[in-house]
Image (tube, helix red, strand yellow):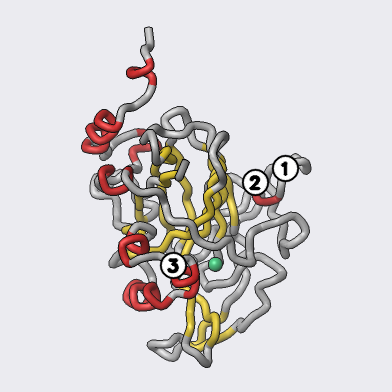
Amino acid sequence: MNTPTSTFWSRRALLKRGLGLVGLTVGGLLTSRSMADVLTQPTPRQGLGPFFPDDGDEIDAIREDLDSTLPISQANDQDLTFVKGRKGKAQGQVIILSGHVLDAQTSQPIPHTTLIMWSASASGRYNHTGDEGTHSFPHPKTGEIIHRTHDEHFQYWGKAVTNRQGEYWFKTIVPGFYPIDLRAGLYRPSHLHVKILPPQSPTLVTQLYFRGDQIPNNALNQELLPKDVVILDAGLTPEEQERVIVDYAPDPSGKITDGLIGHYDFVIPS
Ligand SMILES: [Fe+2]
């Protein structure tokens, strides 16, 4: 029979479990990032941005769940690398992000939490009528002209729901960095937007950034991070900034070969 202590993970148990994260469920995708680092501090909040997929805003609805009572942001699944019913795959470096949603106060996993992820395509263009800015620009390092274009095979947004262990996963691509103000030399580094809706806690909106040898424009992305307008607007300290960067690398076990893997635990403030 379950007692309260066996039903819920104590902090100690969770930390212990964290030591054995390699090969844990979610298809064995979790990496060995120290749980101790992430359990103590809530995930920093960052702005929603102008391209959240609201009903009526989209250029291409790509509604995979035809239940029209569902908001458009929740109408797609957690694999953004293709669109159901279309032959073809999204352009860009594939990544698989997985982890938990945890309560900051109790360190317990939060099951049945909806996560909505959205991002630009590999060339840095959103599927949103509001993304009408500069569609072509020179790469700030190489001068190569980048055309921010729509990718009909990229799902652009998706939804995952945590299981009983508070685990989630998404498969997607590395979005392109994009200009905010070319004259001022301002660009947004590659990032994923995430909205987390725990059943009984306030919604958390944040953005995750990329690091890794195989991440496109990795060096440039690291350069752009400390100057990023969203990070500065949110007032993130260097330590908080570090906590929203995810390291991606090939699966060390060699089992997952269709993308780089990264781990992130969202810690929800009470
Ligand atoms: Fe964005």
Which type of secondary structure does the marked residue at label 1 adopt? loop
Judge whether 213 appears above or below 163 on screen: below
**254 and 114: which is toward the camera:** 114
Task: Specify the amino acid type for callout 3.
Answer: Gly
Q: Residue 70 carries which label?
A: 1
Image side of residue 147 versus residue 248, left or right: right
Q: In this view, does 10 lie above or below 138?
A: above
Q: Which residue is drawn at 51% across and 68% down?
A: 122
Disc 1 vs disc 2: Cβ atoms closer than 8 Å? yes
What is the C-alpha distance between the residues marked 2 and 3?
29 Å
Q: Do callouts 2 and 3 mark residues in contact (Cβ within 8 Å)?
A: no
Q: Mark 3 points at which residue?
A: 235
Task: Please report contact status of discs 1 and 3: CB closer than 8 Å, yes or no.
Answer: no
**Mark 3 CB within 8 Å of ligand 1:** no
Q: Position of residue 255 (x, y in %)?
A: 30, 44
Disc 2 crowd, CA 10 A, few/some/many (<14, 14-19, 20+):
many
Q: Hey, which quadrant is residue 128 in on the image?
A: bottom right
Task: Tell me if the residue at label 1 has its CB under 8 Å from ligand 1.
Answer: no
Image quadrant of ligand 1 equals bottom right
- Residue drawn at point x = 69 percent, y = 54 percent: 62
Q: What element carries label 3?
A: loop
27 vs 220, nearest the viewer: 220
In the image: residue 10, left or right of residue 26: left
What residue is shown with label 2?
74
The amino acid type found where label 1 is placed reads Leu
Q: Position of residue 107 (x, y in %)?
A: 36, 35
Q: Position of residue 187 (x, y in %)?
A: 48, 79
Q: Are there few (<14), some (14-19), or many (20+) residues within 10 Å of tag 1?
A: few
Q: Quadrant of the N terminus?
A: top left
Snapshot quadrant of residue 39: top left
